Image: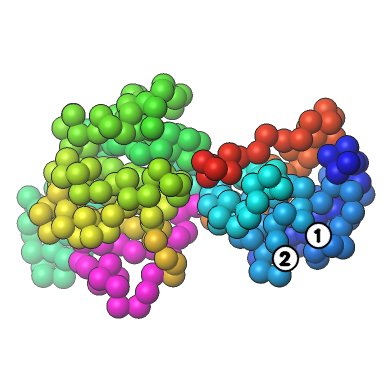
């Protein structure tokens, strides 16, 4: 019965709960806000990035992720037969993460850290300080979804040539080329490799020693999930100069543990998972769009594939 109901109850779990509630209440004044599935009636909705600590997910009909990655939610689904519909928010995350990656890539190509160090030594070394350019750069992006496309857009705006890599290699808008991941390494090493992969059974450890062996003096940026990159292999690739610098925004366990080698490695930049912080109005607006479509058509939104994990 739930998916024929026009009576909607929503539990919101988020730091920006008040903003999200305000957007929802303005668009759908009859929505009832609740603090558990038990207190809900009609169509029971949860908006959250992580599963609640105090109740199971399968009490809800629909879980809208306040974020792009649904790995935490999918992992918490017990019986897939009784799984809620899961939808997610990408909003402006492609552009946000694109700016993050481009910012670090420009700092790297423009040798900003080197120039600062030269200044500290009063060293007028033009050769060491000379820039490289984004318009000359070859960029590879693993992951060709909306986030990969946003990253590609940021680099292409400055004239870089961007190749996207996906499981199938099917053409996608927003890239100069798209190839299957298995073909990575047939061309010369990219200057910048960006990882924007979801955490799934298939992507676990996908970027391993064999992939990193294809690199030569590259900047590696991981903005997807930590589990997709083999960090021991990264340590070896850094020592061999295959990776000249790594910017890591995501880790296999977060926060990154005190004392981990990545905190102090001179060629690693650690950032605390901030490349794509979901904007609360993006999460609320996306949910409103999906709810409006359901109320118009009576069709539940298309769920992410829980087995696949995205
Ligand atoms: C952040 O990592 C997200 O998945 O939204």
Q: x, y percentage for residue 25?
A: 85, 52
**Quarter in which the N terminus is drawn:** top right
Q: Residues within 10 Å of mark 2 (few under 14, many from 20)?
A: few
List the residue tagged with mark 2: 55
**Residues at discs 2 and 1 in contact (Cβ within 8 Å):** yes
Write the start and end of the magenta stretch as one range. 256-276
**Residue placed most toward the observer, 51 or 275:** 51
Residue 274 is at least partly visible in this image: yes
Residue 109 coordinates in the image, percent (x, y) = 23, 47
**Disc count in the image?**
2
Q: Please report the residue visible at 44 percent of the width from the left and 70 percent of the height from the top.
A: 255
Residue 49 in view in this figure:
no
Image coordinates for residue 93, horizontal then vertical, percent: 53, 45
Drawn side of residue 250 relative to residue 160, left or right: right
Label 1 SS: loop
Cα distance between the residues tagged 2 and 1:
8 Å
Which disc is residue 100 wearing? none
Q: Is residue 238 above or below residue 162?
A: below
The structure's colour scheme is: rainbow
Instruction: Look at the numbered disc 2 and say if its residue's Cβ is closer than 8 Å to ligand 1.
Output: no
Residue 115 magenta: no
Residue at 20 percent across and 49 percent down: it is 209
Q: Does residue 274 show up magenta in the picture? A: yes
Which residue does the image show at 32% across and 50% down from the upper left?
205
User: Mark 1 or mark 2, which is nearer the start of the sequence?
Assistant: 1
SS for dot 2: loop
- The 10 Å Cα crowd at callout 1, few under 14, some 14 to 19, many 20 or more, is many
Q: What numbered label is drawn on residue 37? A: 1
- Outermost residue to the top: 171
Residue 12 x/y as whole percent: 74, 59
């Amino acid at each position: 019965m739930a998916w024929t109901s026009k009576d909607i109850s929503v539990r919101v779990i988020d730091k920006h709960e008040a903003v999200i509630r305000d957007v929802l209440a303005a668009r759908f004044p009859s929505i009832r806000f609740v603090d558990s599935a038990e207190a809900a009636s009609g169509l029971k909705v949860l908006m959250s990035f992580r599963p609640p600590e105090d109740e199971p997910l399968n009490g809800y009909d629909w879980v809208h992720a306040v974020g792009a990655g649904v790995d935490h939610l999918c992992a918490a689904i017990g019986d897939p037969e009784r799984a809620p519909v899961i939808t997610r928010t990408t909003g402006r995350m492609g552009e946000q993460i694109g700016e993050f990656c481009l910012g670090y890539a420009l700092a790297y190509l423009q040798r900003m850290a080197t120039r600062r160090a030269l200044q500290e030594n009063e060293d007028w070394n033009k050769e060491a300080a000379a820039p490289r350019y984004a318009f000359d750069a070859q960029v590879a992006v693993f992951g060709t979804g909306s986030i990969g496309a946003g990253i590609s857009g940021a680099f292409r705006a400055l004239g870089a040539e961007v190749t996207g890599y996906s499981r199938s290699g099917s053409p996608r808008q927003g890239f100069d080329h798209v190839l299957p991941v298995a073909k990575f390494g047939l061309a010369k090493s990219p200057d910048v490799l960006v990882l924007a992969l979801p955490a799934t059974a298939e992507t676990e450890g996908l970027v391993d020693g064999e992939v990193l062996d294809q690199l030569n003096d590259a900047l590696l940026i991981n903005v997807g999930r930590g589990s997709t990159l083999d960090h021991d292999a990264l340590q070896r690739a850094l020592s061999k100069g295959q990776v000249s610098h790594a910017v890591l925004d995501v880790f296999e366990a977060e926060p990154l543990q005190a004392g981990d080698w990545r905190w102090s490695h001179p060629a690693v930049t650690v950032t605390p998972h901030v490349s794509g912080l979901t904007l609360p109005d993006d999460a609320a607006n996306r949910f409103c769009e999906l709810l409006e479509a359901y109320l118009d058509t009576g069709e539940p939104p298309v769920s992410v594939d829980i087995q696949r994990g995205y």
